[in-house]
Image (cartoon, rainbow, N blue to C red):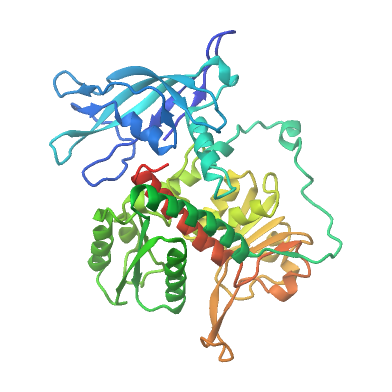
Amino acid sequence: MTRNHVGSARAGSNPAVHGFFLIYCFGPDERIEILSPVNGDIQATISNANDLFAKQNLYLASRFKEKHFGRSGATSGLTSSLAFTLVQAGSIAPYPITVNLKFRFWPLGRKDADDNLTSIMGLVAVTWPNCLRKWLPLTRFLHSLRGHQLGQILVSPPLASLDLPDLWTPNSLRQGIPATHKSFKGQTAVVLDGKLISMKIRSKIAAEVGQMKKCLGKVPGLAVVLVGQRRDSQIYVRNKIMACEEVGIKSLVTELPADCAEADVQNAVMRFNKDPSIHGILVQLPLPEHLDEEKVLDALSLEKDVDGFHPLNMGNIALRGREPLFTPCTPKGCIELLIRSGVEIMGKKAVVIGRSNIVGLPTSLLLQRHHATVTIVHAFTDNPEQITSEADIVVSAAGVPNLVRGNWIKPGATVIDVGTTPVEDLSCEDGYRLVGDVCYEEAIKVASVITPVPGGVGPMTVAMLLCNTLDSAKRLLNFT
């Protein structure tokens, strides 16, 4: 977590960036803790900083000695400084960069299995060398480097690297941004092939999984908890398991009856939390009405929440300067589709139809982080047709077949249809077909870019799940 402000620097001096950065704090339940300073003694090792940089795919050119702070005399707010060199060949910093860091320790007042008090190590100050030639917050720097490697699979950048200051100057806001309203002369809409794009992503994931197996003898593991026999949920789980097999990811499925107790679901989740061969866990949503979705998701280990629904992940999506461990798969897939298709997001008007915690809300937050002007349309919105017709980008995730008609769409708009409602159709092999929120036959005559159902967002959702699982395994296994 970061609270940054750039301080003034004298001419010729090294720029300083001040703030707080939550590095990693593993409590007895192996979760990364939220910053919560309390009074008490601490016992921590400064070598934990190594974990941060290793997990960000950076290399320490020179190791530093481990420092222990015992209970005697150690108090909240104790500080320590160190300097070391970061290098990463082929990145934005091909030459070694020496960074001076100042750490402070805060205790959490809890003991781990070895009777040590759990603590947070925070970075309170960082000084960059002049060679960087600009002021750069630590989080932006780290995520830029990390994003350089992740970019080999995905093209969407880390969220923290997108954050810009809100300077309310018309010229600075509009400079270089294309006009919001573009002409559309009736040419054929571009249909985004989610299957094709997801296959390209999967091939790169499979290559990395193969490399991990070759180097470590281990592969990423994904566990799925499925409650009940909802037809659409069974379809989604089946597709996810098949995708795991294709790229070499291990998968396990625990199926529970629809009338199971809440404790049964939580116990299944917690078993996977403790399984070192499992790096990603997802609970297939929605759950039966008698189960408390919030309590079930709270049982997930934050480091294995590859669906990205943990409250801390969602909160980090919403807050500027923060980077979630995982971004929810469907919203992440929507953004990846837009970027890969060359659709401009910055400065555009975007309407998200639906406000579910699974798709609508996180999608609106992601679009906002990409500097779109976002409006949410929901069941209680007056004049949804009028609001939607003003949007350059429409993302529909209401789960209502054919809700969005052609006259809802502005000529030339980009339409992302997330809806996948199973509708009975005896002419189909499975007895049903999937229908989107958007009336495709009408919308394709008006939009400039559109996704089909099926074959649009669905395959991208699965690809993002695989990507999150691989990312989790690399982090937990310290594999770069």
Judge whether 203 appears above or below 22 on screen: below
- Which quarter of the figure has residue 199? bottom right
- x then y, percent, for residue 480: 42, 41
Judge whether 290 appears above or below 183 on screen: below
Direction bottom: furthest residue:
426
> Residue, x 47% and y 27% (percent of image)?
87
Q: Is residue 308 visible?
A: no
Task: Give the mark count.
Answer: 0
Quadrant where the N terminus sits is top left
> Residue, x 59% and y 72% (percent of image)?
454
With 84 as the anchor, is 335 left or right in this view?
Answer: right
With 12 as the anchor, is 445 left or right in this view?
Answer: right
- x then y, percent, for residue 347: 70, 44
- The one nearer the camera, 369 or 427, is 427
- The one nearer the camera, 182 or 250, is 250
- x then y, percent, for residue 4: 48, 27
> Residue, x 18% and y 33% (percent of image)?
117
Direction front: furthest residue:
214
- The one nearer the camera, 337 or 245, is 245
- x then y, percent, for residue 166: 62, 33
With 58 as the anchor, is 174 left or right in this view?
Answer: right
Q: Is residue 449 visible?
A: yes
Judge whether 299 appears above or below 131 on screen: below
- Which quarter of the figure has residue 144? top right
